Amino acid sequence: MIAYPWKNGIILDTGFAKIAIDVPRPVLGAVHIVTHAHSDHTGAARRAHVLSTIGTHEILRVLGYSTSEPVHEGNIRVFGGTEVHFIPAGHIPGSAQLVVDDGRRIVVTGDWKLEDDILEPGAEVPTDVDVLILETTFSAPQYQFPPRMQIYEEMERWVKVNMDIGNHVVLFGYATGKSQELTALLNSWGVVPVVPERTHKINAIFGLSDILIGSEGWREHVAEPAVFVLPPNFADILPGLEAELGRPIVARSCSGWARNGFRLSSHGDFRQSLDFVERSNPRLILTYGGNALQFAAVLCRIGYDATPLTKTVFI
């Protein structure tokens, strides 16, 4: 089998089947798999038949994709004699790792995290792994995030203090995944946030409580201090929204990239990455994504056989 990067996705070629994972557009003759519903992983689903978990399928359907086929967790598909199934990745609702068995056990993590959040348990750590193809977005020593429960507590204090003094609050998070975590967290505090349409549609899949911007009753809801959960591209509208609603707005980003916000990442950080490798104990590790070269070097220094997946690798 060979593995190689294709744009931001990965292709596994067994010689009898080609498996294209999270590729941006269809690959001729390939079986296409989408590990989760973030837009930078779903490009092939616009034009090709794709396999996904039931959770990802439901999100894709709501977002207007019609080519996804849901696969139950644990359901094994066989392509050219190679078995493929999904296990949980803990990244966002519906996210999955791909387990490929051609006589060896090969795991492609997709985006993942080990830590539980309010909606999603952490990733299942596979065992008896021959080859681990590990996503490494935050797998560098400078990325070591506080415990999620600590961040949740800090967020609750900040939100409630600002609402108590009369401010509207904005929490920025991606409409798919992060906004559902934020909505569920706010609901657990008894807060119903105001959200845009895409977030509202995905929230509905999970039975979360929100108020749709522009819907009946939304202005009455924001007559008092309220919380908005918005995607980052809404940042430019805040001055206009503040003027329209007549109340100060304070805003924080919720992301692993946040500098002055809450470092609420949906990816595993450096410590989680080391933990994942130690617990799965693979024979060979291929790193991909951000920090792939750096983390492979770290793994080699501590005795693992690791290499960045920047070109074709025979596995």
Image (spheres, rainbow, N blue to C red):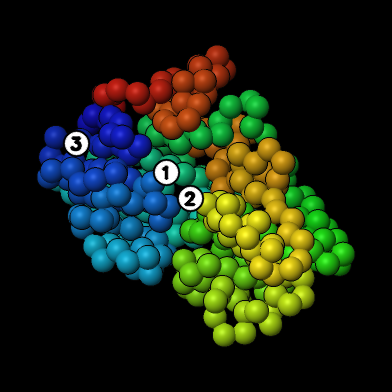
At a point 57% along the width and 40% down the height, the residue shown is 268
Q: Residues within 10 Å of mark 3 (few under 14, many from 20)?
A: some
Q: For numbered disc 2, what is the local secondary structure? A: loop
Q: Of residues 117 and 131, which is closer to you in this image?
A: 117
x then y, percent, for residue 124 = 51, 49
Give the residue displayed 42% in from the left and 52% down from the top.
Answer: 38
Residue 295 location (% of width, % of height): 52, 24
Q: Earlier in the sequence, mark 2 or mark 3?
A: 3
Q: Counting other residues with Cα less than 10 Å from the Cα at mark 2, is it few (<14), some (14-19), or many (20 or more)?
A: many
Q: Position of residue 98 (x, y in %)?
A: 36, 47
Q: Label 1, label 3: how many angstroms apart (C-alpha)?
A: 19 Å
Marking on residue 89: 2
Q: Which element type, helix, strand or loop, lies under badge 1? A: loop
Reading the image, the residue beneath label 1 is 110
* Residue at the top extreme of this rendering: 301
* Disc 2 versus disc 3: nearer the observer: 2
If the image is split into quadrants, where does the C terminus sit?
Answer: top left
The reply to whether residue 81 is visible in this rendering is no
Tell me: 82 left or right of 129. left
Mark 3 — residue? 14
As drawn, 118 above or below 203: above
Q: Amino acid at mark 2?
A: Ala
